[in-house]
Image (spheres, grey):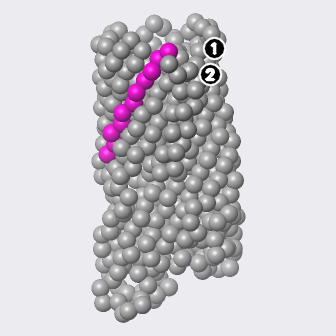
Amino acid sequence: MMNPKKHALVLAVAATMVLPGAAMATNGYFGNGYGVKSKGMAGAGVAMPLDAMDATTNPANMVNVGSRIDAGLTWFSPRRSYTASQPTQQLPQQAFQLIPGTFESDNENFLIPNFGWNHMIDDVSSVGITLAGNGGMNTEYPNVTFPGNPPGFPNGTYYAGKAGVDLMQLATMVTYARKVTDQVSMGITGIFAYARFKATGLGSFAGFSTSPANLSNKGYDTSTGFGIKAGITGDVTDSFSLGASYQSKIDMSEFDEYKGLFAEQGDFDIPSTWSLGAKFNPVKEHTILLDYQRINYSDVAAISNPILPNLGMCQMGNAAGCLGGSNGAGFGWEDLNVYRIGYQYDAGNWQARAGFSTNDQPIPESETMFNIIAPGVVKNHWTLGFTTNVSKSSSLDFSFSYAPSVEVKGDHPFAGATQQIGIEMEQYEIGANYTWKY
């Protein structure tokens, strides 16, 4: 039999070969849960040990899941589109009115792996490696045309060809967890983050950029950074537990090829998050989870800065507000509060799960124009999950998630009430995971 450590390394390498296309059911662009068990309960699990993916939710739980390897695959299908209304009046070309109509993004099917390895050092401590990603912003809109335009007239969403972005963030987490007492566990995780990004079809914004040559169509660029995550879990009674975790802001290196797009010369950090959770066992076989998560998108100027008045400052000669500037325009996302409820029924050889999560709307109505390429507008996730034991040391997990379609509409920021822009997203996700305990 293969040594567990060698087996874990082989699976980890295999996972990293697939992850660069990562996307997933999203709260903004953060995943709504990262392990298949957690996904079956709408991402809940701060106060409940589940599997070797727990480092993504609460590192303290890793010491309570035993020595194991979890490896799986998820099919994710986001359906993105935008609608530009017929202008009520034609404005000068600099008003930048969009071609009217409804247009759908390509790239609707993704396969995303998950991987976690946890090893018990002794009865009260463990070490683990977990791979997790953020994504869901892989958009590509066709080279849309306006009927009747003369030959050679610029086409595309922003009149610069096919438009879209592809953002992937992969975190490699190394966790140490320990039982401080019989009731309390603590854990700390070191995070190495890798990001990959490209943008296309944004060339028409060159006049608003501090570096027009580094704005769009530069292929993929990469970025790296380090951070930490810490957590604690405690049993208050035999049937009630509490948990909490915090992940630091991860200071990433700049996307140099896109220093004319992202604020602060290509800076695109990973925002800080914190979570609270409670677990109730009113009856032994039944578990209810309540979780809260805060995602601080305001940590990152490229994500949270609004398009106006920043680009207005740019037009007036203040370079700080231009794309890529020190206070450059961004996507205008707001901090996100996520609320989750999860349920598990444990019949011994199998478990059934269900969950629901809801969150604030991160994208204001005033920010729809730029968020055509990043329409992270879904609010609610409905989920189901199931686990069946294959043997004494192995099991299979399954999850299903559906996020109903949400549309956000707002006035075109450069054309006022003469044109409205609506952005829309709907999501489906099916996950499967294999667990080997040793």
Secondary element at image label 2: strand
Q: Position of residue 256 (x, y in %)?
A: 68, 63
Q: Residues within 10 Å of mark 2 (few under 14, many from 20)?
A: many
Predominant secondary structure in magenta? strand
Where is residue 148 drawn, in percent x and y? 30, 90
The residue stretch that appears in magenta: 428-438
Q: Position of residue 421 (x, y in %)?
A: 37, 69
- Residue 56 found in image quarter: top right
Name the residue: 40% across, 46% down: 111
Q: Is residue 156 left or right of residue 19?
A: left
At label 1, which amino acid type do we have?
Ile
Residue at x-position 54% and y-position 76%: 203
> Is residue 368 left or right of 128 when viewed as pictured?
left
Q: Residues within 10 Å of mark 1 (few under 14, many from 20)?
A: some
Q: Which mark is residue 127?
A: 2
Residue under label 1: 121
